[in-house]
Amino acid sequence: MNLSYLEHQFVEHLPDHLQEGILYISLKYATAGHCCACGCGKEVITPFSPTDWKMTFDGETITLSPSIGNWNFSCRSHYFIRHNQIVHASSWNTGQIIASRLEDKASKTAYYKNLNGTSGRILNRKALLQRTPKKRRALAQKLLNTFRTAWEKLESQKSSA
Ligand SMILES: [Zn+2]
């Protein structure tokens, strides 16, 4: 069932399980999360950054821009969050999705290029890493460990040879 309204809640950390109908906002981690407004229950995470989402709080309600397009979910829902209201929009076709992704990539590339050299880029990577959801961070750590183990194995082979 399509939701028409989200109640916002300012939190320090997004909870592990998001409750339907609530828009969680963490200013500390510059990110928001809610359950897909189509009612499918999938969790939607919208990081705030100059090239991602922007949040407007008028003292009473929250507006996010741009729209939320859940193309990776089977529901492929598309909606706006304006003044806590869900404004459902038409789903995009594959061409529109690809065009939007390319545009997004181009704007990110342009933005990071404009930052002063590499320090800005590293700082931003760090900020991005900090808001990476726990699960993904665990996966990255696992990958790192795998590489490290492989590397150590190689090193020990070298020294025993
Ligand atoms: Zn959905």
Image (tube, rainbow, N blue to C red):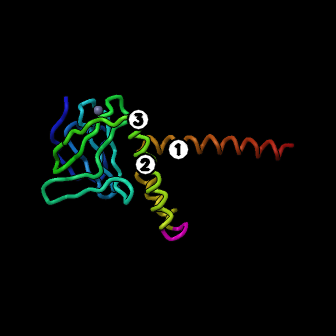
Q: Is residue 71 left or right of residue 36?
A: right
Q: Tell me the SS state at disc 1.
A: helix
Which dot, 1 or 3, sits closer to the camera? 3
Query: In whole angstroms, how far apart are the C-alphas of marks 2 and 3?
Result: 27 Å
Q: Quadrant of the C terminus?
A: top right
Q: Which mark is residue 94?
A: 3
Q: Residues within 10 Å of mark 2 (few under 14, many from 20)?
A: some
**Image coordinates for residue 97, horizontal then vertical, percent:** 40, 40
**Image coordinates for residue 32, horizontal then vertical, percent:** 29, 49
The residue sitting at 45% across, 62% down in the picture is: 111
**Image coordinates for residue 41, horizontal then vertical, percent:** 28, 32
**Image coordinates for residue 4, horizontal then vertical, percent:** 15, 38
Instruction: Tell me the amino acid under the disc marked 2.
Output: Thr
The residue under label 2 is 132
The residue sitting at 82% across, 45% down in the picture is: 158
Main SS class of the magenta portion in the image: helix
Q: Earlier in the sequence, mark 2 or mark 1?
A: 2
Q: Earlier in the sequence, mark 1 or mark 3?
A: 3
The stretch in magenta equals 115-119
The image quarter in which residue 23 lies = top left
Q: Are marks 2 and 1 in contact (CB under 8 Å)?
A: yes
Instruction: Tell me the amino acid under the disc marked 1.
Output: Ala
